[in-house]
Amino acid sequence: MDTKCYTQDGTVDLRGRPVQASKTGKWKACAFLVGYEAFERMAFYGVASNLVNYLTTQLHEETVASVRNVNNWSGAVWITPILGAYIADTYLGRYWTFTVSSLIYAMGMILLTMAVSFKFMKPTCTNGVCGKASPLQIALFYSALYIVAIGAGGTKPNISTFGADQFDDFNPHEKKLKVSFFNWWMFSSFLGALFATLCLVYIQENLGWGLGYGIPAVGLLLSLFIFYLGTPIYRHKVRKSKSPARELFQVLIAAFNNRKLQLPNSPSELQEFEQQYYIQTGKRQVHHTPVLRCLDKAAIKDGNSNADSSNPSCTVTQVEGVKLVFGMVLIWLVTLIPSTIWAQINTLFVKQGTTLDRNLGPSFQIPAASLGSFVTFSMLLSVPMYDRFFVPLMRKKTGNPRGITLLQRLGIGFVIQVTAIAIAYAVEVRRMHVIRVHHVFGPKEIVPMSIFWLLPQYVLLGIADVFNAIGLLEFFYDQSPEDMQSLGTTFFTSGIGVGNFLNSFLVTMVDKITGTGGGKSWIGNNLNDSHLDYYYGFLLVISTLNLGVFMWASSRYIYKEETLQALDEDCGRIDAKPLDTSPLGLQV
């Protein structure tokens, strides 16, 4: 037997040559990717976490306008990955899409640093009071922001899936190494976010915005250097379909054309390749499911007997891929409200914190945005606890290798998130009570109430994110059709993006509706004379209703079941068996 044991999932090196399993991939390759992620998250959160304060204090935007602009930019950052994933899955592959996009990302960060540093590119300030920005200065600032968004569109959907590609699902040993990849991937991103919310926010408000944006820009460049160091040991997946998205439409068209035909009594009578085809091509066969039976008509063997032979029947695996996409869309829809709640961390929570007592001792004042570090702290503590204690405990009780199912994980996160917004509502009611008691109604007056009253809502949202963010990323990667895993990951990013746009829409409409006719806006420029508590109450109601819808949707979801050819430790093939995609725990 050849002493060189190549990977069995068809991965190659950058030049398209088969790679040896012992010398490439696994955690030694992911170490470079994890290093990139930590620095990139530092760059992103170095901008996002305190952007609302820059817009209001430096560019003199109104509260609603600044919240809307932050949400619109954040939404763009998270929605553009749809395009980046499509380009990767259809044309360039993950590595080269990431390479081009990362250069755009870096250029945006450099321009953003210049926009807040050079005098002619930022508003003129005298004795700490800044004038309004000129149209040119505003155009330069927002151009830099959206260049960052375009760059992020190509990096976000591809870097995490590229990391997961470093593990061979056909090799049982590597499958065990992969099982906790997404947990520890997110752990590294939390480290970057922690540094941003603890250190960069303080630097921005006390040492200057130029330095506060320059550090993450340098960090991003350093992260790219780290990423390219690992190039010789990276594995690259070969696209098995020229246009995965086109196959989805082929199934829909075939099902429509065959709509008048009758389905056979047994799914085994539908069109499907022989097992040998999947062995030779390295593709994965997806088992038939009893949902959306109308789509099964695309796989009727005689459905195209009178049609052009160039349009053969679709296979069951192709049909099941479309079913998977429809199922993921259903779950995606019920993640939009939770993403809207998450959007409060970098917007209204920050503005709320600026009205409270932020003094810590006689000479130190906590930046309001730094309270977001407690979200990250709770994440960093919760990820190891979840992976090392919660999963093994639940595994013993349920027999599920994951401990709980992916949708159960999301459900727990959504419950914790509803609890967090309920506490945020209660704290805001308390803040309004203190305002009335002490007659603190001025826009710049500080409410005699510690900013640490906001701590529970930050901590709970961090714990919820361990269930939600990691669970969603793993769910959409795990349940995506094989050739669409970059595009599948964008279900996660686009959900966050649409959630930000939805929050922008809600804030704008609530402000217009409640402020008409001389009424008091719930979200006015002066939060000491508004009704932010009403808005939080509104979010609590829609979050609770959304939780009920999620429980209904998850009860009807059927998980993907694949068959692949596994390997023994001597690189020999064993019999086909259903693919177990359940994570067990980090192994080294």
Image (cartoon, rainbow, N blue to C red):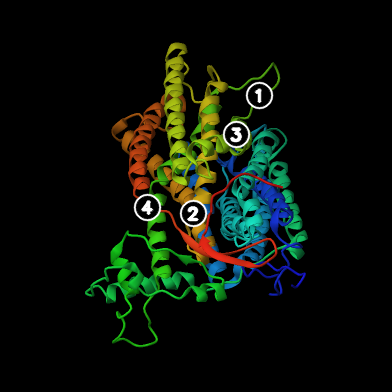
Along the line of sight, the residue nearer the viewer: 254 or 530? 254
**Contact (CB < 8 A) between labels 2 and 4?**
no
Q: Distance between the residues labelled 2 and 3?
A: 24 Å
Q: How dense is the environment of label 2, judged by Cα within 10 Å: few (below 14), some, or many (20 and up)? A: many
Query: Which secondary structure, mark 3?
Result: helix
**Circle on res. 389:** 3
Question: Who comes first in sequence, dot 4 or dot 1?
Answer: 4
**Circle on res. 150:** none
Q: Which residue is drawn at the image coordinates 67% and 43% (left, top)?
A: 192
Q: Image height check: is 552 above or below 540?
A: below
Along the line of sight, the residue nearer the viewer: 276 or 386? 276
Q: Distance between the residues labelled 4 and 3?
A: 31 Å
**Contact (CB < 8 A) between labels 1 and 3?**
no
Along the line of sight, the residue nearer the viewer: 276 or 530? 276
Q: Mark 4 vs mark 3: give the one in front.
A: 3
Question: Who comes first in sequence, dot 2 or dot 4?
Answer: 4
Q: How far apart are marks 4 and 1 (CA)?
A: 45 Å
Q: Image height check: is 471 above or below 22?
A: above
Provide residue 104's location: percent of width, then percent of height. Answer: 64, 61
